[in-house]
Image: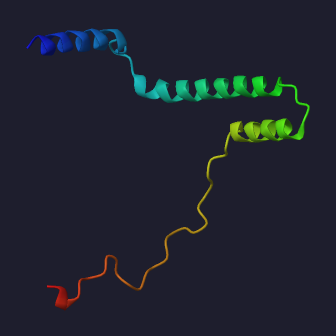
Amino acid sequence: MMFLLRSAFWLTLAFLVIRPGMGEDVSNGAGQLSRDAMARGSQFVAEQIEAIECSDIQCFGGKALATAALQATPLAGAPMHGSPANLPVPLPRPRPDRAG
């Protein structure tokens, strides 16, 4: 019983500390905040990678791979096909009569 009371106390305390302020709309700002944080973090990591001095080809290759991985990927454009092809066979296929 004491375990449940202690757990309820700490969970309530954590909720009061972590929860957003009253009346704040977190849904709109959270996406922009996370995008900004990811952009700044990627920029910082890229600057640190560029600061590394290389003397061999393996180091240059590693820097190139890391820099390419940190580049922002463009969003996908329009799909190649507007709508999926019509399948002549219904999916899922009906069960054969012998299967019951």
Q: Quadrant of residue 56?
A: top right
Farthest-out residue, right: 55
| Residue drawn at 67 percent across, 44 percent down | 73
Q: Position of residue 85 (x, y in %)?
A: 49, 77
Farthest-out residue, left: 1
Judging depth in this view, the residue of 43 and 23 nearest the camera is: 43
| Residue drawn at 77 percent across, 24 percent down | 47
Q: Is residue 58 left or right of residue 83?
A: right
Quarter containing the C terminus? bottom left
| Residue drawn at 20 percent across, 14 percent down | 7
Q: Position of residue 77 (x, y in %)?
A: 63, 54
Q: Is residue 34 left or right of residue 91?
A: right
Q: Quadrant of residue 81?
A: bottom right
Q: Position of residue 84 (x, y in %)?
A: 49, 71
Q: Position of residue 59 (x, y in %)?
A: 83, 35
User: Looking at the picture, does residue 32 appear above or below residue 83?
Assistant: above
User: Looking at the picture, does residue 67 appear above or below residue 34?
Assistant: below
Farthest-out residue, bottom: 98
Quarter containing the N terminus? top left
Q: Quadrant of residue 39?
A: top right
Judging depth in this view, the residue of 6 and 85 nearest the camera is: 6
User: Looking at the picture, does residue 63 appear above or below residue 88?
Assistant: above
